[in-house]
Amino acid sequence: MIFDAVVCVGPHKVQTAKLAIRSLQFFARPRRIYTIVNSKFFAELRSLPENGCPITLIDEDAFIEAVSLPALEQYLTQRTGTSHGAGWYLQQFLKMAIARLPDVAGHYLIWDSDTIMLQPVEFFDANGRVLVNPKEEHHKPYFELTEKLLGFGRSVSFSFISEHFMVNTGYMRELLQTIESRAPGAKNWVYAILDQITVENLKHSGFSEFETYGNFLQVHHPESYCCRPLNSSRTGATFFGMSPNKWDVYYLLKQDYCFVSFERWNRKKGWRLWPAKIRSAGIYAFDCASNIVSGRNKRELEIAAALCN
């Protein structure tokens, strides 16, 4: 199946995003990688080699009409008294808006910019159904919102919120059209969503693009996907910080994870990283020597070098 990839990059995740993009190029081989980021980071991300997967940079503040970080900050401040969360909401809307690009593929893979793929992952089954990675989260405000927007609440016993989601472009367009058609007047779909979130929920976590799209699939296109769990970890930053080197990536490659996320909320800094960093450096050095002598671990060493050099 031909698909594109979409990576939204926040201002504090540029270094990790570089690794995430290289890992997509190496293991997933999408047709194109749309990278949505503030334009001030364009020069830094243009330095990434394309490696057979062209990278298209998109300015996050000029992609959706009337929607930008300053515009959302102003909207949130007017309703809640604070602009907190504007970037979090913006990146979700950007991932949905990609569906309306005229040249986007029939499917596109949303991939978190703080997540590094460590082995090939299947995104479709033998019948062409999208493979979903189910989780256990259940945040009630998300479904209070879908009830208002779409007329239904939680439709499955699991969560669609994961580090990635393979989206059917046509179905996402259908979802956006449905939101617009149910909104009063000719309101922009982004503000049609935000207006339906209560002030209290808007201050915290009032919307999930994955839960909204996933439950829309379940109600309207249940035959289009099936679930398969993947072995992954969200603790990369706890051990290696937000900028893992090739020793750290090599260590993770040997743990049999499909992917590992480096999340800022649970990161460690400075001397707290030393034990894990020393361990990964020691294992890397030992296995490099082993490779020279016997050729063992050659594949993992090559992958770590490819992702980090």
Image: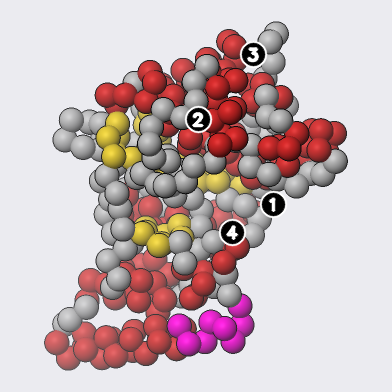
Q: Where does the magenta region start and end?
A: 269-276
| Dots 2, 3 in contact, CB < 8 A | no
Crowd class of label 2 (few under 14; some 14 to 19; many from 20; radius 10 Å): many
Question: Is 116 displayed left or right of 181 in the figure?
Answer: left
Q: In the image shown, does 308 or 83 lie closer to the viewer?
A: 83
- Residue in the image at 45% along x and 57% along y: 115
Q: Mark 3 and mark 4: span between their CA atoms?
A: 34 Å
In the rendered image, residue 144, in percent from the top left (x then y), is placed at 58, 28
Q: Which residue matches tag 4?
A: 13
Residue 161 at what x, y percent from top left?
46, 43
In front: label 1 or label 2 = 2
Q: Of label 2 and label 3, which has the lower sequence position?
A: 3
How many C-alpha atoms fall within 10 Å of the one at disc 3: few (<14), some, or many (≥20)? many
Query: Residue at left 82%, top 44%?
Result: 82
Q: Magenta stretch mostly in which secondary structure?
A: helix
- From the viewer's perspective, is the residue at label 1 or at label 3 nearer? 3
Which residue position holds label 1?
40
Task: Classify mark 3: helix, strand or loop.
Answer: loop
**Res. 4 in view:** no
Amino acid type, residue under disc 3 in the picture: Ala
Measure the alpha-carbon separation of dots 1 and 2: 31 Å
Q: Which mark is residue 212?
A: 2
> How far separated are the C-alphas under marks 2 and 4?
25 Å
